[in-house]
Image (cartoon, rainbow, N blue to C red):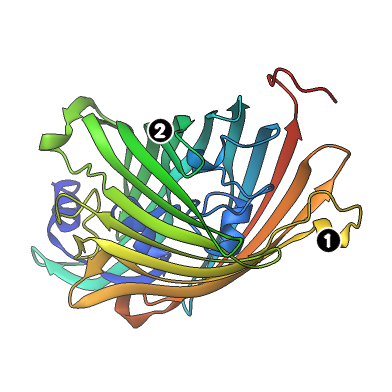
Amino acid sequence: MKTIKPLLLILFFDLSILVSQSPLNSLGHGTIINSPDASSLGLSSTGLIPSGNNSFSLHNPTTWTELNFTYLSVNFNSNYVNSENYNLFKSFLSGISFLVPIRNKYGFGLGIRPYSRKDFKIFSTKENINFDNEVYTLSRTYSGNGGISSFFNSLSFKISEKHTIASQIEFLFGTYNEERTSFVSTKQFNFNQMIGYKSTMLSLFYKLKKTFNTRDFYFFSAYNFPIGKKYITQKNDYEFIGEINSADSSFILPSNLRIGFLYNLASSIFISSEFSNIKFSSNKPMYSNIFEHEIKSSNRLSLSVQRMKKTNSRDFLERIQYRVGFFTMGHYIRLPETNINETGFSFGIGLPFGISDNQIDIGFRFSKRNGINQNDELLSQFSIGMLIGDLWLIKGKRR
């Protein structure tokens, strides 16, 4: 009976939140990664707009067909979230990509990158609880980490000088670890849970190239959506529940429509803009019910300017790429009577090195978003990537 009473308290008493570390990350899929590489981060882009060496994007296969080299790319990200009551710092590998142009008409690529991440810690307490003629103090720590990764395989086809199409298949996988520790007076109760994800997404891309008064204009579009079945594998300290079809679970993946343009304003100066719409098939909460919330569609808009490098120049300064961007977006999590919005700016550079077409990209982004209980968050992101270009697998070209 002494053990049953504390268990009943844990089950039936709600606790007030005292301190949280990035509480929004506890809801839904956490943070969906918008800019997975350093060059895209510098533009505040989601990767649709070309921002890399030789005017291509690691995440838009329609820009790969005219590459002169095969490329290997590795990127690292660091995120810092600061608020009045908490701060959180995380670093992680944000992508490895391998791209191969084929006969100036096709492009092939594969790699791995993060789709979303969760990192949070929440403390709650309730004192002087009267239960069955006894007084208790109940406190709880709720923490989680992990996320979803994507292994992608892409193929592009240049139909003509103006039109290029591409498709991409993504295999999503990952785990999310959740730990709850409850204290009832002097007694401690632990609950550990691991959730695994499996799913597949298909993406379709299109690029249009036009020339106006010797200035190039590019239009890009992309649409990705989940296909096939989605599964959750759930395991805790006591039993293995097994695989659950997504129709009976809370695992919901959104579709994403993106459009954008890139215009050669003057010489090597390019301006660009990008719009994206993330849409969920349901507004039901996913995974966590710590905070009352719902899932909603969200929009994102970015504007950017970049100076492309002059590839044939021997002047090191002329071969440096400069990027700056601005973005505003709505979060896909909605709190009661509160929409979560984020606005920020970014900048970055691309530094050439070596005798081949190699480059180190560095990107910074700073933003502000309104959080839970009117607790605004300041977010900082740093990314560094290395791009190595060589003639691997390209026939008919000599060093």
Where residue 262 appears, x then y in whole percent? 52, 60
Where residue 47 appears, x then y in whole percent? 50, 51
Q: Quadrant location of residue 184?
A: bottom left
- SS for dot 1: helix
Q: Is residue 137 in sight in this rendering?
A: no
**Residue ID at (39%, 36%):** 175
Check disc 1 and report the residue beneath it.
318
Badge count: 2
Figure check: 118 above or below 304: above
Q: Quadrant location of residue 339?
A: bottom left
Amino acid type of the residue that numbered disc 1 sits on in the rendered structure: Glu
Query: In the depicted view, which residue is nearer to us: 349 or 394?
Result: 394
Side of 202 relative to 157 (left or right): left
Check disc 2 and report the residue beneath it.
168
Figure check: 142 above or below 84: above
Which mark's residue is nearer the viewer, 1 or 2? 1
Side of 319 relative to 17 (left or right): right
**Residue ID at (40%, 53%):** 32
Amino acid type of the residue that numbered disc 2 sits on in the rendered structure: Gln
Where residue 222 appears, x then y in whole percent? 37, 47
Side of 146 relative to 298 (left or right): right
Packing grade of label 2 (10 A; few <14, some 14-19, many >=20) is many
**Quadrant of the image containing the C terminus:** top right
First in sequence, mark 1 or 2: give its number. Answer: 2
